[in-house]
Image (cartoon, grey):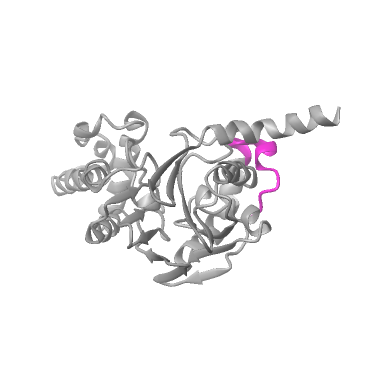
Amino acid sequence: MFRLTALFLLWPLALAADMLTPEQIAPGIWAIEGPATQRDPENLGNNATFGLIDTPAGAVLVDPGGSWNGAEALHGVVRGLTDSPVAYVINTGGQDHRWLGNGYWQAQGASVITSAAAHADHLDRGSLQMTALHTLIGPDGLAGTEPTSPDIIFADRYELTLGDTRIEILHVGPAHTPGDSLVWLPDSATVFTGDVVYVGRVLGVMSFSDSAHWLDAFAQIEALEPAHLVPGHGPATDLATAQKDTRDYLANLRDQMRSHIDDGGDILGAVDVDQSAFAYLDQFDALARRNAQTVYEQMEWE
């Protein structure tokens, strides 16, 4: 009976781990892509792309997972890639899958690194995120999850060197969230972008997003001239694809909205601005009109 109970308890974690797809980007560097779906009891809040950097002095995880159980499922994937313990976890932003798994990793002995802007966002929205996750992944999926404070908080930039691996964390937000940061590995020219970049699906412009500064944040990625780019959502890619799916989508939406506003258009008509060039992106029908309304509200007073 004990064995059957244990297997029953482990089954959701195994299922969630199976929904995470690792891809090696360079020696010791992986993207771990989660499903492109809403948070649910099967993915345990891990509907995003994460990263792993393995070094002789320990591993570094880029984003912890969206819940305690989501983090534990992610750990199952990490164990299949490296024997190194996770020494550090980097939070790249303010969304739940960028920080609500922190407690699990801290319990394993990892130190969590977060920008001050992201930490403030966590404090501001954490209760709402927990309430939403209770509905989306269920009380069993959320079990054990508690908002926790980071171990290291930085303002604009933080550098971490493990052995001969240098990691730079650059706060470039506000973009999708106020605390969005890039994780840059100069030796391999690899950037983990967090939610500054979406690939293969429409990005989400939320009430807490900054659509104007988001383009400035993207320009900082371009200035790095990365050879490898790991987005916050979608598979590892190149800069040209990120430009097409994220920068160009957002620039077009703002350009269309500026014309709409200058022509006297109102918020009701804002949802009809032309975004058809990006209809190939997943979730276009669900998000495009909502994005347009949010961008109108932001640009009306610019």
- Rendering coords of residue 99 (x, y %): 54, 54
The C terminus - image quarter = bottom left
Residue 3 falls left or right of residue 136:
right
- Rendering coords of residue 61 (x, y %): 51, 54
Magenta includes 288? no
- Most frequent secondary structure within the magenta stretch: helix
Residue 266 falls left or right of residue 83:
left
Magenta includes 135? yes
Residue drawn at 37 percent across, 65 percent down: 170
238 or 56: which is nearer to us? 56
Q: Quadrant of residue 7?
A: top right
- Rendering coords of residue 284 (x, y %): 32, 32
Q: Quadrant of residue 220?
A: bottom left
The N terminus - image quarter = top right
237 or 275: which is nearer to us? 237
Q: Is residue 215 above or below residue 3?
A: below
Q: Quadrant of residue 16?
A: top right
Residue 33 falls left or right of residue 222:
right
Q: Is residue 60 above or below residue 282?
A: below
- Rendering coords of residue 35 (x, y %): 46, 34
Residue extent of the magenta highlight: 134-146
Q: Find the residue positioned furthest to the right.
A: 1
Residue drawn at 18 percent across, 49 percent down: 258
95 or 222: which is nearer to us? 222
Residue drawn at 29 percent across, 32 percent down: 281
Q: Is residue 80 above or below residue 110?
A: above
Q: Is residue 96 above or below residue 221?
A: above
